[in-house]
Image (tube, rainbow, N blue to C red):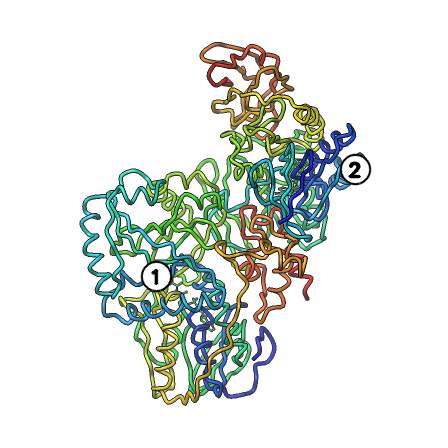
Amino acid sequence: MTVTAHGALPDVTYDVVIVGAGVVGCAIARELARHRRLRIALVEAQDDVGQGTSKANTAILHTGFDAVPGSLEARLVREGSRRLALYAAESGIPVEPVGALLVAWDREQLAVLPELAAKAEKNDYRQARILGPDELYAREPHLGPGALGALHIPGESIICPWTTTLAYATQAVRHGADVHLDCRVERADDGVLRTSRGTLRTRHLVNAAGLYADELDRRLGHRDFTVTPRRGQLLVFDKFARELVRHILLPVPTALGKGVLVAPTVYGNVLLGPTAEEVDDRTATGSTEEGLALLRDRGRRILPALLDEEVTAVYAGLRAATAYEDYRIRAHPDQAYVTVGGIRSTGLTASMAIASHVTGLLADCGLDLGEADDLEPVRMPNLGEAFPRPYQRPELIAADPEYGTLVCHCERVSRGEIRDALASTIPPHSLEGLRRRTRARGGRCQGFYCGAAVRELFEGRS
Amino acid sequence: MSRRHVDVLVVGAGPAGLALAARLAAWGVNRVEVLEREQEAGGVPRHCRRREFDGPGFARRYAEAAVRAGAIVRTGVTALGWCEPPALDTVGPAGRETITATAVVLATGARERPRSARLVAGTRPAGVFTTGELQQAVHLYGQYIGHRAVVVGAEAVSYATVGTLLGAGVDVVAMVTDLARHQGDRLKAVNSRLGQRIPLLSGTTVTELRGRGRLTGVALRHRDGRTTTLACDTVVFTGDFVPDHELARRGGLALDTGTRGPAVDGAFRTSREGVFAVGNVLHAVESAAAVAREGVRAARHVRDHLAGASWPPAVPLLVAPPLRWIAPNRLAPATTYDPFVLRTAEFLARPVLTVTQDGRVLHRRRLLTTAVPNRALSLDGRWVGSVDPAGGPVRVTAR
Ligand SMILES: Cc1cc2nc3c(=O)[nH]c(=O)nc-3n(C[C@H](O)[C@H](O)[C@H](O)COP(=O)(O)OP(=O)(O)OC[C@H]3O[C@@H](n4cnc5c(N)ncnc54)[C@H](O)[C@@H]3O)c2cc1C
Ligand SMILES: Cc1cc2nc3c(=O)[nH]c(=O)nc-3n(C[C@H](O)[C@H](O)[C@H](O)COP(=O)(O)OP(=O)(O)OC[C@H]3O[C@@H](n4cnc5c(N)ncnc54)[C@H](O)[C@@H]3O)c2cc1C
C-alpha cells in the first residue's frame, strides 16, 4: 500500500497491473482491492490520479436515459449511476440531484421530445416527463425567451469528479494497492511492462489508458478501435451566476453529440459547454478563441443573464471517441489482458459498473479472485456547497482553529484543509492537484489574493 | 452562534478602512471594529514595494495609527455574508460570530481580472500571474518566478510590475496593450522602452497561452491582423481592475453598472441605510494615498449617521461611452461632493464634459489635457446643487 512518484519500482510480480489512473482505472483498482489476496498496482503516466479526461468533464451523474438501448454502455451507465450515488453518500463525495431539463427551442425539437421520452423508457428510466412552456419557465425563470417545452429528467445529478476519482484511489491504496505515478508504460509483452521508471511484472493486465488505450492495445497486437479525440471546451462562471439556474439545461441532442449545456456545479458555479470538436492531437486540451466565442453565443440564447457574470475558469477535456457507438471493453484470455477502451462521454457515471464488469472479465481470463471483503469506508473532505464546509462548522473550528483560518478567500478554503490534503493518502504533486483536493486557488481571483500563500504552504511541505 | 454589537463595523483593513477607523476612533466613537481576512492588516500596499512607494511601510503606519487611536483591528477574520443587515456573519480561528452594527462600512478593495475572466484561450500552464499574486510571491515570500516575462497592460500598475519582475531577476520581453498607446507615466514609459529596452506592443491582443506544465509563449494578434508568438515562461496580467463587490452584492446593495462596485452618494452612503462603502471597492483603482484620504473624508459621514442623520434618497448619476464610469454615482440632496473620479475607454484630446438632467445642461467644461484610459480623470462637484432631486438620472458625456 504505497504511492510512489519516483525511484525504482518494486521487484515483485503483481497479480494485476492497471494502466491509467483515471476515474475508470481507479474504480477498477478499488474493486480489485476488495480481494485481499491480490497484489495490485495502478500505473499512471502523469504525476497525479485523475489528471486526464477525468478531471475535465461536465461532472454530471447521468441516468443513462439517452443511451443507445441495449448497448453495454447503457447497462453500465444505468448500473454505475445507482452505485455511484450510494457510494458518494457514504464517502462524502458531493452530489446534488438537481435534475435536467432537455429544452426544445423550435417545433422540430419539440417534436423529438416524445421520442426521447420513449428512449428513456427503453433504458429503463421511467420518470421522464414532458413539460409545457409555463411549467418550464416556472422552473427556470431566467431561461432565454422562445423555449417551447422540455423533457424533465429528475434523476440527473451533478457530482464532484475530482473527489470521486480520489476516493476510489484512496480506498484502493488503503486496502493494499500500489500506485506508481510519473510512470508511463511504454511497452508491454508477456507480463513484462517497460515503463519510464523501469520494469514491472504482472500476471494480468488491464488497459484503462483513456485516450491512449488504442495505442497500448496495438502494442499487444489488437486493432479493434482507434481513438479520435473529441474536444470539449467549457466555461466556468462566477458563483454569482448560481442562482440563475436550478437544473441541468440540456439541448436536444444532434448527430455530433449532446450539444452545449448549462449546468450548476457542486462548487456553486455554473458551467457552459462543452464544444464537440474532432482533434488529431491527444494532448490538445487547450481552449480556442473560436470555441469560447461559440460557447458564449450558445449560452446567450439559453440563459442570457449568465453572460453578464465573470468567467472564473476555462478548460477543455478530450472524449475518447471511437468509430463505435459503445464502449470497447474486451477480454483477451490468452494474454490475460482486458482492454477498457472507448469510455467516451459517460465514464465518470459508469465507473463503478465498469469496474465490476472488468473484474468479471479478469476472472474469465483465469484470475483467481479469492474471497471478497467489504472495504473500510472512506470519508473524503467535502468540496460541495450543498454540504457543510469546514469553515461553516463551529465544532470543527473549536477543536482545531486551523479550520477557521481561511487562506483561499474566494473558495473559503482553510489552512486546515490544505494541511490535511498535503498529508493525505495520495498527496498532490502540484498546485493543480492541491486545487482538485481543496478548491484552493480555484475561485474568481485565480490567485490574486491567495496564490502566493497557497504556493508557500504547498512548497513548505518538502 | 454568538452575537455582539459594535458601533461601526468596517470590513477590510486596507488604507481606506484603516484611515476611516482611525479617524472615528480618534473622535471617541466607542466601538470601531475592523475585520481583515488576511493575517496582516494593510491591504494591497502590504505587497507594493517600489522605489517611489514603500507600500509595506505605508500599510504598517495606517494599521498602527488605527490601533493607536483605539480602533479594534481583527486580522484573520472574514466577513462571510449578511444576516438581517446591518449584521455580518463572520468566521475566524475563534469560530463563527454574528456582529451587528449601527454602521457597516465596506472597504473591501479591488483586484485585477485574471486570465480566465479576460477569456484568453489556450492551455493552463504554470507561470501565469496577476500583479497582486506576483507582488506577494516576490515581496512577501521570495518565491521563484521565471526567466522571461511578458507584461499584459501598459498602465501605471504595469510599469510597477516591470519593476517587480526586473528586481526578481526576470527579463521582461515585452509589454502588450490592446490600446493605441501606453497609459502610464510618460517618463516611466520612455525609460522602460529606451532605458530598459522593453518593447511596447500597442494595438496588440494576447489571444492564447501556450505550453504544457510551464508556459512557453503567448500568441499575439496585432492591429493589422498579423499573428505572432512571443516565447516566454511567465506572463503577468496587470490592471483591468474590478471591485471586490461580493459582500455588496450579497447584501442586495445597488451596484453601479459602470464601476461594478456599490453605488454611493457624496457621503459614501449606499442604497441601504446604515451601510457605507469607501475605497477602491467604489472605483478600481485610485492610489493608496488618495484612497486613505477618502477614508478620512468618509469618517465624518459615518459619525453623522451615528448621531442620527437621515439617509436621503438619491438620483442616479450615469455616464455614456466612451466614458466607462464615474464615482460617486448617486446624487443626494444637501450633500457636498468632492471632485468626482471618472474613467474613459478611449484617448480623448481636450474633451468637453457635459452634465445634463432631463435634457437640461447642469455643467459643461473643457479639459485642458488628454483623457487617458485607465488613468484618473476628475470633474468638480460644484454643479450638484442644481440637480433636481425629483428629476430623472443625471448623465455625463464626453466629446
Ligand atoms: C467535455 C467532456 C464532458 C464529459 N462529461 C461527462 C459527464 O458529465 N458525466 C460522465 O459520466 N462522463 C463525462 N465525460 C466522460 C468522462 O470524463 C470520461 O469517460 C472518463 O473520465 C474516462 O476516464 P478514463 O479513466 O477512461 O480516462 P482518463 O481520465 O483519460 O484516464 C486515463 C489515464 O491513463 C493515463 N495513461 C495513458 N497512457 C498511459 C500509459 N501508457 N502509461 C501510464 N498511464 C497512461 C493517462 O495519463 C490518464 O491519466 C465527459 C468527457 C468530456 C471530455
Ligand atoms: C495590484 C495592485 C497594485 C497597486 N499598486 C499601487 C501602488 O504602487 N501605489 C499606489 O498608490 N496604489 C497602488 N494600488 C492602488 C491602491 O493602493 C490599492 O488599491 C489600495 O490598497 C486600495 O485600498 P482599499 O483600502 O480600498 O483596498 P485594499 O487595500 O484592497 O484592502 C481591502 C482589504 O479588505 C479585505 N477584505 C476584503 N473582503 C473582506 C471580507 N469579506 N472580510 C474581511 N476582509 C476583507 C482584503 O483582504 C483587503 O486587505 C494598487 C492596487 C493593486 C490592486
A339 in relation to A22, above or below: below
State the mark number for residue A62.
1
State the mark number for residue A424.
none
The foreground one among A440 and B83 is B83
- Tell me if mark 2 has few (under 14), some (14-19) or many (20+) residues whose alpha carbon lies within 10 angstroms of its own: some
Question: What amino acid type is highlighted by mark number 2?
Answer: Arg
Instruction: Tell me which chain the residue with mark 1 is part of.
Output: A
- Tell me if mark 1 has few (under 14), some (14-19) or many (20+) residues whose alpha carbon lies within 10 angstroms of its own: many
Ligand 2, seen in the image, is in the quarter at: top right
State the mark number for residue B61.
2
Question: What amino acid type is highlighted by mark number 1?
Answer: His
Residue B254: x and y in percent read: 51, 30
The foreground one among B271 and A54 is B271
Write the residue at 54% across / 25% down: B347
The foreground one among A212 and A264 is A264
Residue B64: x and y in percent read: 79, 39
Q: Does the numbered disc 2 mark a residue whose Cβ is under 8 Å from ligand 2?
A: no
Q: Quadrant of residue B337?
A: top right
In the shown orientation, is residue A6 left or right of residue A158? right
In the shown orientation, is residue A5 left or right of residue A341? right
Residue A262: x and y in percent read: 37, 49
